[in-house]
Amino acid sequence: MNRAQFLRLMLAGAAGALLPPLARAASVEYDFWLTRLKYDSGDWDVDQRMPANLITSLIDYTNLRVDPKEHVLALADPKMLTAPFCYLAGHKLVEFNPDERRNFERYVRNGGFVFVDDCNHDIDGLFARSFEAQMATIFGPKALRKLPNTHALYRSFFTFKDGPPATGFELNGWGDDLVHDYLQGIEIDGRLGILYSNKDYGCEWDYDWRNKRFLAEDNTKFAVNIVMYALNS
C-alpha cells in the first residue's frame, strides 16, 4: 500500500469523519491537492506564487487529477491529517504549540509526507535552528539525516543523477554560511515522512519559467519528483 492509498483509508475512516461531506466528496475527485501548513510562530505564507506553478507542472507532466487550488490549513487543525502532501516553509522562528506538535507527529508517524523548505534569508539560520530543534524533540536527536544522492526521490519521475538541483537562493545553508549538495529527511518505517531543504526551492519555484527566457528549462521539475515520491512511496 502506498502513501496515497493509506491516506485515502484515513479519509474514509476516523480522520475522514472530521471533515464535512462536501470536503470528503471533493477529495475523491482528485489524486492530489497541495496543502500549505500555517503555524502560529514565524512566517508561513512565503512564496505565494509557488503553489500555482507547482500545480501547473503536475498537470502538464503527469496524469494525476490535480486540484487547481492551494489548500491552506492550520497545523493545529485535525483536517490536515488527511492531506496527501503538506508544505511548510518560512525564514523565521518555528516553535510548535501543543496542538501543532501533536498533529505534526501524528501525521508523519501515520504515513503523511511534509516537505519543509528553509527560505534561509536570515543571517543566523533561525528557521533551521528552531525547526531542527523541534524535530529532535519530537522524533529524536538523530532522526534527521542526510539523504544520499542515490535516493529514490531523485528518480521518482525525472532523473537527477547528481542529487538535489541547485537554486539561485542558497544564501546561508542551514545557518552555517555553506551551500550544501544534499537534502535531509526523517524516515518512519522505511518511508521518508519529512523532506527538509535549505535550498529555498519555494522561492525558485515562485517564478514562472515559461515567461522567463533566461531559464532554459522548467525549474519546477524537481517539485514534480517530490510529489510523485510522496504519493507512491
Image (cartoon, rainbow, N blue to C red):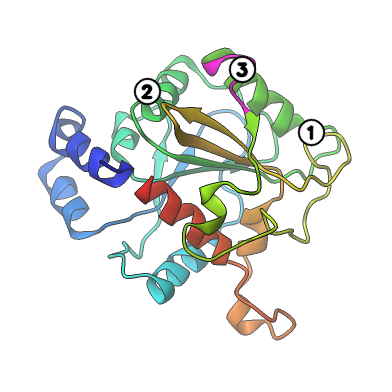
**Looking at the image, is mark 1 or mark 3 earlier in the sequence?**
1
Q: Is residue 49 left or right of residue 204?
A: left
Q: Which of 70/143 is in front? A: 143
**Element assignment for label 3:** helix
Q: CA distance from mark 3 to mark 2?
A: 15 Å
Q: Mark 1 Cα within 10 Å, few/some/many (few <14, many 20+)?
A: many
**Element assignment for label 1:** loop
Q: Which region shows up in magenta?
A: 139-144
Q: Which of 152/60 is in front? A: 152
Is 212 rendered above or below residue 82? below
Q: Is residue 1 left or right of residue 174?
A: left
Seen at 61% across and 48% down, the residue is 150
| Residue at the disc numbered 1 | 125
Q: Which percent across, then down, holds residue 222?
A: 57, 61
| Residue at the disc numbered 2 | 106
Seen at 13% across and 38% down, the residue is 12
**Looking at the image, is mark 3 or mark 2 earlier in the sequence?**
2
Seen at 51% across and 49% down, the residue is 152
